[in-house]
Amino acid sequence: MTYYDECEYYSTVDDVCNVIDYPALQCEQWWYCTFGCRQKHAGKYVKVRGTFNSARKKMFDKYGAEWSFQYSEEEWEKIKNDPDRWWPMEEELEVIV
């Protein structure tokens, strides 16, 4: 199975999950992953505990390529409270630890 991310081609899930290797993203924290408008879980999000890369891997393990964006807790607070946001993402689908 192949995946695409940030306009580049990756041949395996491990390649996708190791795209970014910045020290700040290697800290364990909560991440919020959303689904696209035409995906099965559109309008929902998954809260995932881990580093940036391990959280991505957990999402790919569970949902394959059927999810869209990954946000830090700080980014999530800004986006979910943005008065100009028109897309739904209020419903928590699950928590993955």
Image: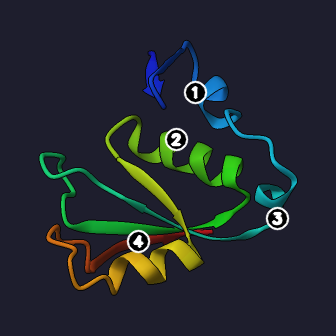
Q: Is residue 96 above or below residue 13?
A: below
Mark 1 crowd level (few <14, some 14–19, many ≥20, 10 Å Cα): some
Q: Nearer the viewer, mark 2 or mark 3?
A: 3
Q: Which residue ends up furthest to the right in the rendered image? A: 23
Q: Position of residue 58 (x, y in %)?
A: 58, 49
In this view, the mark in front (1 or 2):
1
Say which element carries label 2: helix
Which sits earlier in the primary sequence, circle 4 or circle 3? 3
At a point 63% along the width and 68% down the height, the residue shown is 97
C-beta proximity under 8 Å, tags 4 and 2: no
Q: Which residue is mark 4?
A: 94
Q: Which residue is mark 2?
A: 61
Task: Find disc 1 in the rendering and name its residue.
Answer: 13
Locate residue 78: give its quadrant.
bottom left
Viewer-nearest of discs 4 and 3:
3
Mark 4 residue type: Glu
- Mark 3 highlights which residue? 27
Of labels 3 and 1, earlier in sequence is 1
Q: Earlier in the sequence, mark 4 or mark 2?
A: 2
> Which type of secondary structure does the marked residue at label 3 adopt?
loop
SS class, disc 4: strand
* Rendered view: 90 above or below 29: below
Mark 3 residue type: Cys
